[in-house]
Amino acid sequence: MPHLVIKPPAEHVEGQPILRPLPSRQCRAVGPFVFFDHMLATSYAPGDGVNIRQHPHIGLSTLTYLFEGALLHKDSLGSDQHVGPGDVSWMTAGKAIAHVERTPDDLRASGSRLHGLQVWLASPQRHEQGESHYSYHPEDQLPVSEALGVRIRLIAGAGFCLASPVPVLSPTLYAEVHMAAGSTLSIPDEHQERALYVLEGEGELEDEAVQPLTLLVLNAGETPTLLAQTDCHLVLLGGAPLDGPRRMNWNFVASHAKLIEQARSRWAARDWPTVPGETERIELPG
């Protein structure tokens, strides 16, 4: 059975070019992953950079993972963290959190490049109105395996006999994979829902062509083998299916419309936790 192939359109977020394969009309979620942004490699001139102003979240965890550049994460819990390549910035929103992400001042002054991923994972219903949490995991804390031309770094969750320290809330797979040309990777069925996103390179998955900048949703129960026809850089993501449908509205994810309505009203009324030292914010869209 052919795999579902999603080719995301190009978009921009606060000036940063992105590709967003999730959510799409063909697929709303893969395991807990309800949102997937590929921040395309972008050069910023001196004085320029990313500035995502203060904005709210509920019912999800955000995970930022960079290949180039750096971002400064600040949130309403008081977190103030420099995030570099290979690090994990993990924020669980719970019932209400606000945060900002921007290019650090030194890189804004000198000019910089940015390339990375940001994903949202819907929280299980028992956690979606829980307490907020932030944790930072430097590159050297993430487990790695390397054999026969394949290097796997477990960003979050568990898989390939590795387990990440990131405190995910449900069974999760999120791995960065580098494959040398000619190498193969058997993808186990450890998780019910899985997908792979190719950042660079070309391959073949059970005689099916794999192109860069596409998301392939794998069939449940299968253990396909990926052949790297060139050097490949990709991520694997997935996990257990969501415990019920999710609604998404702006920056809010919830299992019930009432929770989203309450969050929209609170943000509009400025009845929301604020990020220390921040005054600018993104207003509620109409």
Image (cartoon, rainbow, N blue to C red):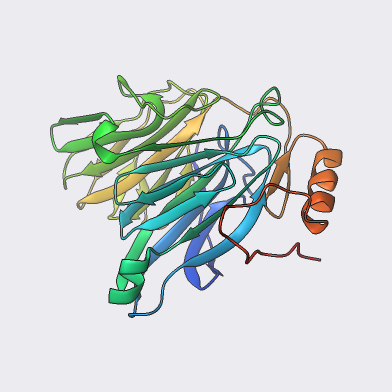
Query: Residue 225: which quarter of the image?
Result: top left
Q: Is residue 214 visible?
A: no
On the image, the x and y values in percent for residue 76 come to 59, 46
Give the residue at x 56% y 32%: 31
Residue 150 occupies quadrant: top left
Q: Position of residue 218 (x, y in %)?
A: 48, 36
Split into 4 quadrants, where in the image is the C terminus? bottom right
Q: In the displayed structure, would residue 161 be above or below residue 272?
A: above
Pick the residue in front: 116 or 130: 130
- Answer with left or right where residue 267 lies relative to residue 152: right
Q: Position of residue 12 (x, y in %)?
A: 54, 70
- Percent of width and height locating residue 192: 52, 24
Residue at the (33%, 80%) spot, across then down: 46
Is residue 144 visible to the viewer in this orientation of the structure? yes
Q: Is residue 34 above or below residue 84?
A: above
Q: Nearer the viewer, residue 267 or 64?
A: 267
Residue at x 56%, y 37% (from the top left corner):
30
Q: Nearer the viewer, residue 147 or 88?
A: 88
Of 77 and 176, nearer the camera is: 77
221 vs 56, left or right, is left
Q: Is residue 153 above or below residue 165?
A: below
Drawn side of residue 199 relative to residue 262, left or right? left
